[in-house]
Amino acid sequence: MTQTLISAPPRTGKSQYCVYLIDQFSKKYPNRQIFTNIIGINYPGVISISSTINRPFDWRDLPNGAILFYDECHEHPAFSDDDLLKHFQPDLSRLDMISSLIDANKIDYRVFPIIDEYYDDLYFKEMVNGIALTIPDEKKIAAQHFVQHGKLPDFLKKGLSEFLPKLKKKETVKQKENILDIGRTLTMHGHFGIDIFMITQNVKRVNDAVKAASSKHLVLRRMFGWDMCFIFEYIEVQTYFAASNRKNATRFSVFRYKKNLYKYYVSSEEHNIQKSMPVGLVMLFLFVICIFGTAFYKGKNLYDSKYSDKKPQQVEKQDAGSAQNTSPVNNSNQQNLAAQQTASQPVKPLQLSDSDKYHLQSLIDSCVNSQQMTLEQCKNIYDPAKSQSIAASQTNQGQPVAPLYDSSNPYDYEYNAAKMPTDAPILSNTIIYKGKCHAYSQQGTLMKNIKESDCRRFASGDRPFNYFKQQSFNSQPALTANTLPAADVKTDQSMTAEDIAKYQEAKRQGLI
């Protein structure tokens, strides 16, 4: 069982938060009694209490296991740090009645305890001052006088008239101490299973007894007039609350005001509080929006540049440009792939009706008789199925599949096709420099993808077969001078210097 101190300025929502807790506790602990002094409380099952300066509420009168919500606890004389009992008016009606009885010589059983208390006090004073013990004799004389005459002797009436004001003052101090004991004994609430919630506007307005008994402190703050409050929870009472100790809170939460709870108590829900928005928060919000907007704009442009559909004209231009820039090897590879796909697709035979078959057979017979051709030749001309098979075979034969060449593995190349690629990077030379072998193509470019082992193998003299060397189609069979015209022989023998230079350059490049 704990005592919780709730502090918050006015118009923060302290009362509604307490009503919210009452609603939660009544559902969670239906067998526990709940007491509160919240103004106008009418929640089902909650007992309303009242308190005044002269007759303050005493939590010690609560049953065991009860729950107490005491609002504005700084107005209770036992909980307030201010002296609210300086104008305290104790209940002295009993002493006033006794004083009137003594003045009227109406002595009864109500006066005798005062007389005994008077002589006890007088006896104590004589003992302190060392005076002779004459009190028992005086008390006996007063008793005999009362029995004989029915009234008190004059010396006793005088003594009581002086003693009663002192007794009233003593009674006032006693009643004040009894009230202050209500706060001093708060540390004992756990022994009786009582949960206490103290609500105040400022921690400085409650005394040390309340602070010492509190094991939890909730600080409520309402900012910018919003319909909610921020709750900071501490395990010790925070005398001062500022930005420096906000980070020390063990828990932080937000409580939104609930309109359905206004009906359970009297609240200033119609109080107009102007709502505002801090400039710093607005700037932060705009900054976050700008960041997200910039990221979205850049991401959209990046997405459009990579994945958006292009216009047909751009696609056609790009295809045309790529076709022009494609190397012969790539063209050959694309043609080979197309040929492989065409060859892999089975040819669907033509389905002819009976009348078409009869008409076709008559055409073939007429061709054999009139054109004087063989039956196979006529079928090739008139039979669609035969023509289709011949066209497919010619297509496959006209576009032989050329192998793909991997320049990084020149020794693993196998060539089984009849048609050779026109050109590709080929390992042509190697240089060993500072212990590292460098490979170069036939055009003098550095081939970085060649393995070190293959480079050294080439440098050692082991040459792979060059499948891409251009063949010389200008060579003609050796002819004798008798078979050639005289003009031709003269032309071959009279080569210009320019022709000789071109011939040597072509030979150096390996073209002939």
Image (cartoon, rainbow, N blue to C red):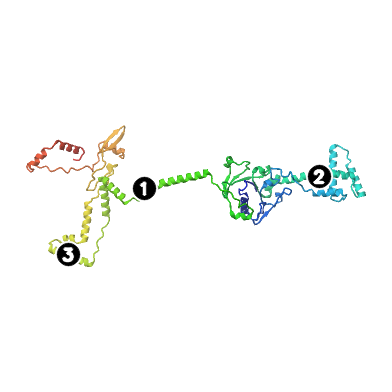
Q: Is residue 481 visible?
A: no
Residue at the top extreme, as displayed: 434
**Is residue 218 or residue 379 the one in the foreground?**
218
Q: Earlier in the sequence, mark 1 or mark 3?
A: 1
- Which residue is found at the position 22% from the left and 67% from the top? 354
As drawn, the label of residue 437 is none
- Dot 3 falls on a residue whose secondary structure is helix
Q: Is residue 391 left or right of residue 238?
A: left
Where's the C terminus, which quadrant?
top left
Q: How far across and how far down the image is residue 336, in percent?
A: 26, 50
Amino acid type at mark 3: Leu
Can you identify the residue that label 1 sits on? 306
Q: Earlier in the sequence, mark 3 or mark 2?
A: 2
Question: Would you identify the image quadrant in which residue 156 lies?
Answer: top right
- Which residue is found at the position 43% from the left and 45% from the top? 294
Q: How far across and how far down the image is residue 14, in percent?
A: 62, 49
- Dot 2 falls on a residue whose secondary structure is helix
Amino acid type at mark 2: Leu
Q: How many marks?
A: 3
In whole angstroms, how far apart are the C-alphas of marks 2 and 1? 100 Å
Q: Is residue 129 left or right of residue 214?
A: right
Question: Would you identify the image quadrant in which residue 329 lies?
Answer: top left
Question: Would you identify the image quadrant in which residue 261 lies?
Answer: bottom right
Q: Earlier in the sequence, mark 2 or mark 1?
A: 2
Local crowd size for mark 3, using a 10 Å CA cut-off: few (<14), some (14–19), many (≥20): some
- Which residue is found at the position 62% from the left and 56% from the top? 263
Q: Is residue 510 left or right of residue 70?
A: left
Amino acid type at mark 1: Lys
Can you identify the residue that label 2 sits on? 167
